[in-house]
């Protein structure tokens, strides 16, 4: 596909990009995409990183199979499981997915360090020309969550990376807060991108788990581990191919598992560390490199979380290592 090697001229601003590169899934009927995919001679691998999602992963796989019956778009359904305790791997296999333990892939790198590492390791067994990542905890999965982001990659010249956009309602019991989801995105990722990477400010859901690119692109960038992965990918893709090669597609609404606010603090910390790591590599944090700034901020770091509980005040400590996996094409080339 010739556009893989083209870097289009970027838009002058995030606002201009938003107008030029924002789409709706309704613009891309799946039957048309399947026909275009066939014309281009491309294949697609869908990767579902999974941890204790036995209640949702089977339904997602079934929806992808149903989509393929009317519009054959997904050639490989790959579930990379974090050795889940709830039988996720068995459910996924029984519904027809290829299933791997994240720790058996690229085993020379030791045990996997969370979601980002699983996504990186999955590239070693994907066969598609395009790689589509899909979150496995969606409770109301609809087919556009699988095919929608494929639209611009297949139909728009020069687009190589596409991110999902959607509304994130927050359900608690019988009540629904229409825009209550995506708290880490709104309170951490978007402010940081506006401040340090303003080109990315037009993305509605920069941390969305549904996104696609050509395998060549994913294999040429490093992957941060854990919850830092989406932040790192956004920055690295921007630097690799430019804003003009990136797009987003409105997929409507998405309901997924919501984490407790206390857990979101750790997720936000991962986002901050990812941005700080890239800024440091770019030489933009040198002015902050005072003697008191710990090197561990960029590598192995204790996260202290002070909380009030029914049993009193507690200080919880988590040790989370931020690992950066190299571009996987460099690794596979020497194996």
Image (cartoon, rainbow, N blue to C red):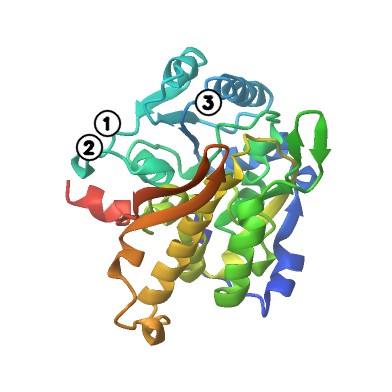
In-image side of 303 versus 24 (left or right):
left
In-image side of 257 versus 307 (left or right):
right
Residue 156 visible in the picture: no
Do callouts 2 and 1 mark residues in contact (Cβ within 8 Å)? yes
CA separation in Å, label 1 and label 3: 19 Å
Q: What residue is pinned by disc 3?
A: 53
Residue 39: percent from the left, percent from the top? 59, 42
Q: Secondary structure at mark 3?
A: loop
Q: Secondary structure at mark 1?
A: loop
Nearer the N terminus, badge 1 or badge 3? Answer: 3
CA separation in Å, label 2 and label 1: 5 Å
Tell which residue pokes out farthest to the top in this image.
94
Q: Nearer the viewer, residue 48 or 322?
A: 322
In-image side of 205 versus 171 (left or right):
left
Nearer the N terminus, badge 3 or badge 2? Answer: 3
Do callouts 3 and 2 mark residues in contact (Cβ within 8 Å)? no
Q: What residue is pinned by disc 1?
A: 104
Q: Residue at x 57, y 69 (%)?
A: 192
Q: What mark, if any, has residue 107 been given in the picture?
A: 2
Q: Secondary structure at mark 2?
A: helix
Q: Residue at x 36, y 45 (%)?
A: 117
Residue 292: percent from the left, percent from the top? 32, 78
Residue 215: percent from the left, percent from the top? 43, 49
In-image side of 316 versus 300 (left or right):
right
**Disc 3 packing (10 Å; few <14; some 14–19; many ≥20):** many
Q: Residue at x 47, y 53 (%)?
A: 305
Do callouts 1 and 3 mark residues in contact (Cβ within 8 Å)? no
Residue 217 visible in the picture: yes
**Disc 2 packing (10 Å; few <14; some 14–19; many ≥20):** few
Q: Nearer the viewer, residue 107 or 176?
A: 176
CA separation in Å, label 3 and label 2: 23 Å
């Amino acid at each position: 596909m010739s556009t893989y090697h083209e870097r289009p001229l970027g838009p002058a601003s995030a606002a201009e990009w938003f107008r030029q590169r924002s789409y709706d899934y309704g613009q891309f009927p799946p039957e048309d995409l399947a026909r275009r995919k066939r014309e281009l001679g491309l294949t697609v691998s869908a990767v579902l990183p999974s941890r204790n999602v036995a209640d949702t992963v089977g339904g997602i796989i079934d929806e992808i199979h149903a989509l393929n019956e009317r519009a054959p778009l997904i050639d490989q359904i790959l579930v990379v499981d974090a050795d889940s305790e709830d039988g996720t791997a068995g459910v996924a296999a029984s519904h027809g997915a290829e299933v791997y333990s994240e720790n058996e892939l690229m085993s020379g790198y030791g045990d996997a360090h969370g979601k980002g590492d699983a996504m990186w390791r999955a590239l070693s067994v994907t066969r598609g020309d395009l790689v589509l990542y899909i979150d496995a905890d969606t409770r109301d999965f609809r087919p556009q969550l699988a095919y929608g982001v494929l639209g611009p990659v297949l139909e728009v010249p020069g687009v190589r990376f596409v991110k999902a956009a959607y509304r994130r309602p927050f359900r608690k019991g019988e009540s629904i807060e229409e825009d209550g989801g995506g708290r880490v995105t709104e309170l951490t990722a978007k402010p940081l991108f506006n401040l340090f990477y303003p080109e990315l400010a037009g993305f509605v859901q920069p941390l969305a788990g549904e996104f696609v690119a050509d395998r060549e692109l994913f294999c040429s960038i490093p992957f941060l581990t854990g919850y830092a992965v989406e932040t790192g990918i956004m920055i690295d893709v921007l630097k690799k191919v430019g804003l003009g090669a990136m797009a987003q597609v409105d997929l409507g609404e998405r309901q997924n598992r919501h984490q407790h606010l206390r857990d979101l603090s750790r997720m936000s910390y991962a986002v901050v560390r990812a941005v700080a790591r890239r800024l440091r590599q770019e030489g933009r944090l040198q002015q902050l490199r005072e003697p008191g700034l710990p090197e561990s901020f960029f590598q192995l770091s204790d996260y202290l979380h002070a909380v009030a509980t029914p049993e009193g005040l507690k200080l919880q400590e988590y040790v989370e290592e931020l690992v950066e996996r190299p571009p996987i094409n460099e690794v596979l080339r020497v194996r």
